[in-house]
């Protein structure tokens, strides 16, 4: 089954309002590939202006996180339904800057994931090992746990709305990209694990993005790997020309 390449731009806590709109417009104007799925993830306050700027464009918008509850006394949090109301199609969950930076656990992420999917969002679910874990040969064990615990209770049908982003933590924002062999091996492991959890059809269909210092000069080699179906791009997604070059690097 041919999987459509999916390139996502995680803007993190960067851009001002006008800059976010300009960036979205520049990406939209330069998009030459209708065969590639593209989404951008601006900071919460700019979601609606970016969604408005993108109008009828095929480029989707998503939030960088959400809470598991619909509403409540959760200062500073945003619910899945609020993201939908702000014209989001997607949400990123489990990014390492939240798992490790903000101590989000597998159990919490599982709650968020179930709730976001039930609300109707599509989810980019991030997993990945720390440098110390890779050096201790624990990469597969870490990915195994993050997938078993994170995806617990989901059905194969629900998995249709989940993209996995494999992001080795040591490669995020460091300029240290995983080798294509390291990335492909991890992706093959993830796909096999999805097969064990949800069956072969789900494994063949699931999109697995690579993330961690993806740039125009390394994107083509990564995206050419059989189990790499896209990229979750941080730094390079803040420059329209670089993000467009990564989109253009998708295999045809
Ligand atoms: P980076 O970020 O491309 O800047 O390494 C990737 C990510 O955090 O998703």
Image (tube, grey):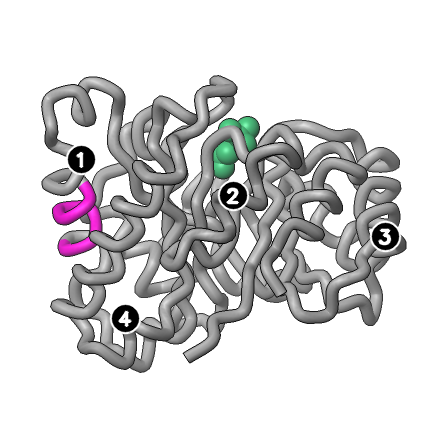
Numbered mark located on residue 203 in the image: 4
- On the image, the x and y values in percent for residue 224 come to 49, 53
Residue found 42% across the figure and 43% down from its top: 74
Q: Secondary structure at mark 1?
A: helix
Q: Secondary structure at mark 3?
A: helix
Q: Which residues are magenta?
A: 143-148
Magenta stretch holds residue 163: no
- On the image, the x and y values in percent for residue 82 come to 57, 59
Specify whether tag 1 is near ligand 1 (CB below 8 Å): no
Q: Is residue 200 above or below residue 185?
A: below
- On the image, the x and y values in percent for residue 22 come to 88, 41
Q: Secondary structure at mark 2?
A: helix
Q: From mark 4 to mark 2, how far is it between C-alphas?
A: 22 Å
Q: Nearer the viewer, residue 233 or 20?
A: 233
Q: Is residue 8 left or right of residue 52?
A: left
Residue occupied by mark 3 = 30
Q: Quadrant of residue 9?
A: top right
Mark 3 neighbour density, 10 Å: few (under 14) some (14–19) many (20 or more): few
Q: Are marks 4 and 2 in contact (CB under 8 Å)?
A: no
Numbered mark located on residue 114 in the image: none
Residue occupied by mark 2 = 221
Give the mark, 3 or 2, whose residue is nearer the N terminus. Answer: 3
């Amino acid at each position: 089954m041919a999987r459509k390449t999916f390139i996502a731009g995680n803007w993190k806590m960067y851009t001002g309002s006008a800059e976010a709109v300009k960036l979205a417009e520049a990406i939209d104007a330069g998009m030459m590939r209708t065969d590639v799925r593209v989404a951008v993830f601006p900071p919460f306050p700019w979601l609606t202006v970016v969604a408005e700027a993108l109008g009828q464009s095929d480029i989707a918008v998503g939030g960088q996180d959400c809470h598991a509850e619909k509403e409540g006394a959760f200062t500073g949090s945003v619910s899945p339904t609020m993201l939908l109301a702000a014209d989001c199609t997607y949400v990123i969950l489990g990014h390492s800057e939240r798992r490790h930076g903000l101590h989000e656990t597998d159990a919490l992420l599982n709650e968020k994931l179930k709730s976001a999917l039930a609300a109707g969002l599509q989810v980019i679910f991030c997993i990945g090992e720390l440098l110390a874990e890779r050096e201790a040969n624990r990469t597969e064990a870490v990915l195994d746990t993050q997938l078993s615990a994170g995806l617990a209770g989901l059905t194969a049908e629900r998995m249709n709305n989940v993209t996995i982003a494999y992001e080795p933590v040591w490669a995020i924002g460091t300029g240290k990209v995983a080798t294509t062999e390291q990335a492909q091996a991890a992706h093959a492991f993830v796909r096999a694990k999805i097969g064990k959890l949800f069956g072969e059809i789900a494994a063949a269909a699931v999109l697995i993005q690579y993330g961690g210092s993806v740039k125009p000069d390394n994107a083509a080699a990564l995206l050419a790997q059989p189990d790499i179906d896209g990229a979750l791009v941080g730094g390079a997604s803040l420059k329209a020309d670089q993000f467009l070059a990564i989109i253009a690097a998708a295999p045809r």
